[in-house]
Amino acid sequence: MEPFLTIAPQSALWEQDIKKSRFIVNFQRVNNEDEAQDFVNRISKEHYKATHNVFAYVIGPQDEIKRYSDNGEPSGTAGVPMLEVLQKNQVHNVAAVVTRYFGGIKLGAGGLIRAYAGTVAGGLQSLGLVERLTRLKVMINIDYKNADQLTYWLKSQDYPILDTNYDTLVHIVVAVAESELPQFEKELTNQFSANLDFEIGDPTYLEIPAK
């Protein structure tokens, strides 16, 4: 399965000036096309005095939905280059709107392509990407005398601790890859002489900085 990359923040803004024209890119994570269109409409209303509000978005693990618009720029010089940058960076569930305030100097077709593509690329580089991983929530129930040792082991093995609760036992919730679960349970059971038990919960998403 291909890595699922997306932008690190939920939304972000980046801008640059090119030959007196101001190019502003707004990004937002989106889960479906309605969210993407709502975002495009909101940015377009915020910048209703702008010369152009050009958008592109990709949705789904395999970019099942991908849309763009040149919004009045010459065909193929704005929305397509933006879409290509999103796909080249392999990001998913991301919408981008590039707002242009014309500065009086025409850029030509090649200049427009570089400007719109470069604004999206510069924005992605500045805000960073994360990889979304699917993991199982596993609750480990353990006695107090072994809890600190368990916590130390989990951190040393880079298992993210999602939550810790206390009552008659200590309940530590961690994220574990499904393929690692049998070995994970076996190793901990051996290490702690069966003084613990496991409750397997629902899948969850983890996000780590993309390499």
Image: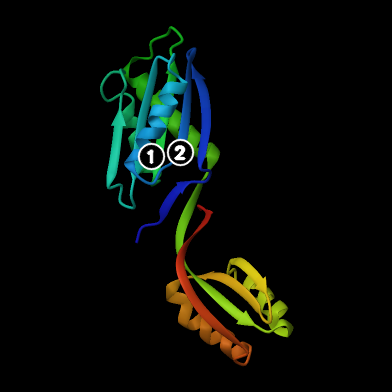
Asked where in the image residue 169 lies, by quadrant, the reply is bottom right
- Per the rendering, the mark at residue 28 is 2
Residue 188 location, x and y as percent? Answer: 58, 84
Return the residue nearer the eye: 171 or 190. Answer: 171
Look at the picture and state if 76 lies above or below 3. Answer: above
Which mark is nearer the camera, 1 or 2?
A: 1
What element does badge 1 sit on? helix
1 and 2 marks in contact (CB < 8 Å):
yes
Label 2 crowd (10 A; few <14 / some 14-19 / many >=20): many
Mark closest to the chain's N terminus, 1 or 2: 2
> Where on the picture, by quarter, is residue 116?
top left
Q: Give whichever of 168, 65 is nearer the camera.
A: 168
Residue at the image position 52 percent from the left and 31 percent from the top: 13
Residue 59, which numbered label?
Answer: none
Q: Which percent across, then down, holds residue 33?
A: 32, 41
Colour scheme in use: rainbow
The local crowd at label 1, few if under 14, some if 14 to 19, many if 20 or more residues have their Cα within 10 Å, is some
Q: Nearer the viewer, residue 74 or 50?
A: 50
Q: Which mark is residue 35?
A: 1
Instruction: Single out the residue that lies furthest toward the front.
Output: 167
Give percent across and percent down for residue 198. 53, 81
Q: Amino acid at mark 2?
A: Gln
148 vs 172, left or right, is right
Residue found farthest to the bottom: 193
Determine whether the residue tagged by mark 2 lies in a helix, strand or loop: strand
Residue 210 vertical position relative to residue 99 in the rendered view, above or below: below
Looking at the picture, how far across and down is residue 16, in whole percent?
52, 23
Relative placement, left or right, of 78 versus 164 is left
- Looking at the image, residue 78 sits to the left or right of residue 5; the answer is left
